[in-house]
Amino acid sequence: MKEIVVSGIRPTGNLHLGNYFGAVKSFIQMQNDYNCYFFIADWHSLTTRPKPEDIVQSAHTILAEYLACGIDPEKATIYVQSDVKEVLELYLYLNMNAYLGEMERCTTFKEKARKQPENVNAGLLTYPTLMAADILQHKAVKVPVGKDQEQNMEMARKFARRFNTMYGVDFFPEPQNFSLSEKAVKIPGLDGSGKMGKSEGNCIYLMDDSETIRKKVMKAVTDAGPTAPNSPKPEVIENLFTFLDIVSTKDTYDFFNEKWNDCSIRYGDLKKQIAQDIAAFNEPIRERLMDYAANKPLLEKIARQGAEKARESAAQTVKEVREIIGFKG
């Protein structure tokens, strides 16, 4: 039997190239090797008070992007978190055995509370228990996460151990971090920063057309150029060569690398080539994305079928949890 992998994404905006190469590309491979549950974490998004009209639309957008990238609903279970009500019951049970002090010490809670001091809600405090419920409802053994979620993953393991110890059972496996570091590529920002991210405003989105991509790339940060042959590239230039490495041919990369080494590089030409190659790479994904986004009945069908599969898994877990705790029926 294949090992179970669970991963969620909050519907807080459109996916960008950093998301694609950093996680989604790995998910596409995982669906062939593992029993995967990929969900859109719309309940988690409530901690930031999204507009009601944006909740469903954002979920549909992320679903369309997942499908356009190549996540196959025939291979992986893709669902919207709020369609699987069982997670709320498990969330309740985990909260009953979670302690205020340990929740308040969570780095993610302290950071979020600092960023939104006017909205320090209970959902922020109990974010780790809902995340743990998302994972444990499927008895997942692996969870692809970044470094910012490592503490929450340790909390999920702690809640699993605590439940098993409290009730004298060996029920929940302890989910392990599934690092993407060896498979994922870190995509730099166009502003010269080390990472592409929505909050930094330095992204190329999967929905961007070629002209939008061209304008963004042409504004990318550079320097005055090399002053000595074969000199090391500064970070802002290395970032541009990272784009060449992932979307261009080896010959193209070698051509501009040689231009750098002999100090004849023209950044305008480099950027034009990068923009052209990113657009060529992105266009098939964008076309599929537009097709999926325009087919609301298909998205609803895929989400409904995914929810049915996820609920079957979660319902069995919650049924057994109820019996272990002492609730019958």
Image: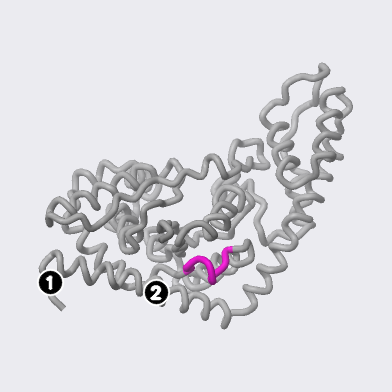
Instruction: Quickly name the residue at label 2.
Output: 83
Asked if the residues shown at circle 2 and circle 1 are in contact, with their CB atoms under 8 angstroms apart, the answer is no
Q: Position of residue 170 (x, y in %)?
A: 20, 55
Q: Quadrant of residue 207?
A: bottom right
Residue at figure coordinates x 44%, y 48% from the top left: 145
Q: Position of residue 63 (x, y in %)?
A: 54, 68
- Nearest the camera: 200 or 238? 238
Query: What's the amino acid at mark 1?
Result: Phe
Q: Position of residue 257 (x, y in %)?
A: 81, 31
Residue 159 vs residue 286: left or right?
A: left
Q: Position of residue 274 (x, y in %)?
A: 78, 45
Under tag 2, what secondary structure? helix
Residue 195 vs residue 234: left or right?
A: left
Cα gap from disc 2 to disc 1, whole angstroms: 24 Å
Residue at figure coordinates x 46%, y 61% from the top left: 36
Q: Quadrant of residue 223?
A: top right
Which tag, 2 or 1, sits closer to the chain's start? 2
Q: Is residue 112 above or below residue 315?
A: above
Magenta stretch: includes residue 34: no
Span colored in magenta: 71-78
Magenta stretch: includes residue 76: yes
Residue at figure coordinates x 83%, y 18% from the top left: 229
Under tag 1, what secondary structure? loop
In which quadrant is the N terminus drawn? bottom left
Instruction: Quickly name the residue at label 1.
Output: 327
